[in-house]
Image (tube, rainbow, N blue to C red):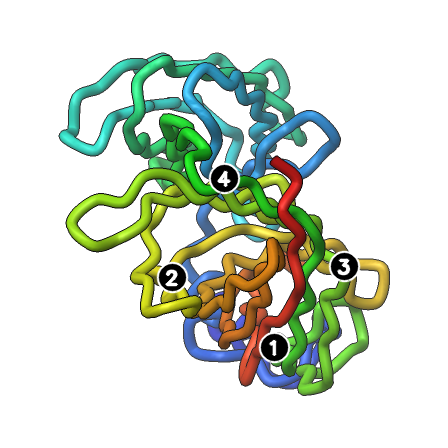
């Protein structure tokens, strides 16, 4: 009966949410404890790619489920590489099992690889919840053709499946992510393709470009950026399909973009999407 009441409360908006999905209702019913990587200056909270040797810091926030109020038992933090080899596995004791706690972790790798970070919190009732991040470490590209710097713009529409603040309904409105600092390094040619690396909004991505005269078709790539919606910071993972034209030391870019992210509002995950996105920009050769 209690579970039915919670679901009904969600549906009719007693938690100030509009349009709860079935997944959101299930989150209430499962009464899992809360765990999340916290966004803060100097700390990583979303999937990122960095150059080998970069140290990353993490804040992991845990708290009991508001409905069950079951005290927390422990937090297990694991880092494994792309082949499943575990490089770190530690259980953290929680100082305040009945309240909100922050646990700090850090990681660095000199090896170019991809790592999965998993934080699993368990309460005394045996309920568990998981937060995950994927971290990529890359070797830099040597600039044989050159380094091009400038800014790009991404525009589209942002949609959500719920309110991002109390009392707000789902969103469907224009989104403009302008003036994103971007740097592209064009390196050696290999098997008819140019090895390349892009730094976009601080994220490095190694990929290739297929040349056709002065036209370059870049491989699809992803990066994370943070947008501000109604004073709420939301991290989006954006996928870019982009072409370039290289002429007179100028690299002109255009293409398409789409992305996704999520935030937790009153204990419920709200999904945020970038739809119908386009990207454009002009970069100038600096070296």
Sequence-wise first label, 4 or 1: 1
Front position among marks 4 and 1: 4
| Label 2 packing within 10 angstroms: few (<14), some (14-19), many (20+) | many
- Give the spatial CA distance, label 2 vs label 3: 20 Å
Q: Badge 1 is on which residue? A: 160
In percent of width and height, residue 110 lies at 36, 13
| Label 1 packing within 10 angstroms: few (<14), some (14-19), many (20+) | some
Q: Secondary structure at mark 4?
A: strand
Q: Secondary structure at mark 3?
A: strand
Tell me whether circle 3 and circle 4 mark residues in contact (CB < 8 Å).
Answer: no
Q: Badge 4 is on which residue? A: 204
Residue 268 in sight: no
Q: Quadrant of residue 196?
A: top left
In percent of width and height, residue 83 lies at 14, 30
Tell me whether circle 4 and circle 2 mark residues in contact (CB < 8 Å).
Answer: no
- Give the spatial CA distance, label 3 vs label 1: 24 Å
């Amino acid at each position: 009966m209690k579970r039915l009441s919670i679901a009904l409360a969600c549906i009719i908006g007693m938690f100030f949410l509009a349009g709860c999905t079935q997944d959101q209702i299930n989150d209430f019913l499962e009464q899992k404890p809360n765990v999340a990587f916290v966004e803060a200056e100097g700390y990583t909270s979303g999937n990122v790619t960095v150059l080998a040797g970069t140290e990353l810091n993490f804040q992991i926030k845990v708290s009991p489920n508001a409905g069950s109020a079951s005290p927390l038992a422990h937090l297990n933090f694991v880092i494994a590489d792309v082949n499943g080899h575990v490089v770190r596995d530690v259980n953290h004791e929680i100082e305040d099992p009945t309240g909100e706690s922050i646990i700090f972790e850090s990681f660095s790798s000199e090896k170019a690889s991809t790592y999965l970070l998993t934080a699993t919190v368990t309460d005394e009732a045996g309920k568990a919840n998981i937060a995950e991040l994927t971290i990529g470490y890359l070797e830099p590209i040597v600039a044989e053709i050159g380094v091009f710097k400038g800014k790009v713009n991404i525009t589209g529409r942002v949609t959500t499946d719920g309110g991002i603040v109390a009392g707000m309904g789902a969103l469907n409105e224009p989104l403009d992510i302008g003036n994103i600092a971007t740097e592209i390094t064009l390196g050696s040619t290999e098997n008819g393709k140019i090895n390349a690396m892009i730094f976009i909004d601080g994220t490095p991505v190694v990929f290739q470009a297929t040349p056709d005269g002065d036209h370059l078709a870049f491989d699809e790539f992803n990066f994370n950026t943070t947008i501000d919606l109604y004073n709420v910071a939301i991290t989006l993972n954006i996928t870019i399909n982009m072409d370039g034209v290289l002429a007179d030391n100028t690299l002109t870019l255009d293409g398409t973009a789409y992305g996704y992210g999520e935030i937790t509002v009153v204990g419920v995950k709200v999904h945020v999407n970038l739809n119908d996105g386009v990207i454009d920009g002009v970069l100038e050769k600096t070296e």
